[in-house]
Image (cartoon, grey):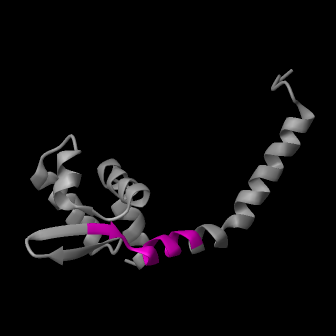
């Protein structure tokens, strides 16, 4: 399994995606805060954090008895690079959509 495949697999779970989104928006957070704000148990959050950490999506910093989590920039760079590598596909798809809309701006299939 490639690094990018592990990244996408880890992010495919809604809870893990939400954790990463929270870390992106708010920056480094302690595990306790992530657990307190979750709708699932602290042990479940710990398991999700472990999956994200093992996939390389997040990184952990230990300070005494506290664990702090943040997003691993390399994982996001991998997603960005993959998206840019496929930008020609998205551009062509949007161009086709523009053409279809220009032919039938009201969306009527007469």
In the image: residue 28, left or right of residue 24: left
- Is 71 part of what is drawn in magenta? yes
Front in this rendered view, residue 110 or 50: 50
- Residue at 82% across, 49% down: 96
- Residue at 84% across, 44% down: 98
Measured along the vertical axis of the image, is residue 87 above or below residue 22? Answer: below
Front in this rendered view, residue 52 or 19: 19
In the image: residue 38, left or right of residue 107: left
- Is 70 part of what is drawn in magenta? yes
Main secondary-structure element of the magenta-colored stretch: helix
Residue found at the very far right of the displayed protein: 103
Q: Position of residue 84 (x, y in %)?
A: 65, 70
Q: What's the magenta region?
A: 69-80
- Residue at 24% across, 66% down: 51
Q: Position of residue 68 (x, y in %)?
A: 23, 68
Front in this rendered view, residue 70 or 9: 70
Measured along the vertical axis of the image, is residue 77 above or below residue 27? Answer: below
Measured along the vertical axis of the image, is residue 26 above or below residue 40? Answer: below
Q: Quadrant of residue 49?
A: bottom left
Q: Position of residue 50 (x, y in %)?
A: 20, 67
Work out which quarter of the rendered image holds the N terminus and state it. bottom left
């Amino acid at each position: 399994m490639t690094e990018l495949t592990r990244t996408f697999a880890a992010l495919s779970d809604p809870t893990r995606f939400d954790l990463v989104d929270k870390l992106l928006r708010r920056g480094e957070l302690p595990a306790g805060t992530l657990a307190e704000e979750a709708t699932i148990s602290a042990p479940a959050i710990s398991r999700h954090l472990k999956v994200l950490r093992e996939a390389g999506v997040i990184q952990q910093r230990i300070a005494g008895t506290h664990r702090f989590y943040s997003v691993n920039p390399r994982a996001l760079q991998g997603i960005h690079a993959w998206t840019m590598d496929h930008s020609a596909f998205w551009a062509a798809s949007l161009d086709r959509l523009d053409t279809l809309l220009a032919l039938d701006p009201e969306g009527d299939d007469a």
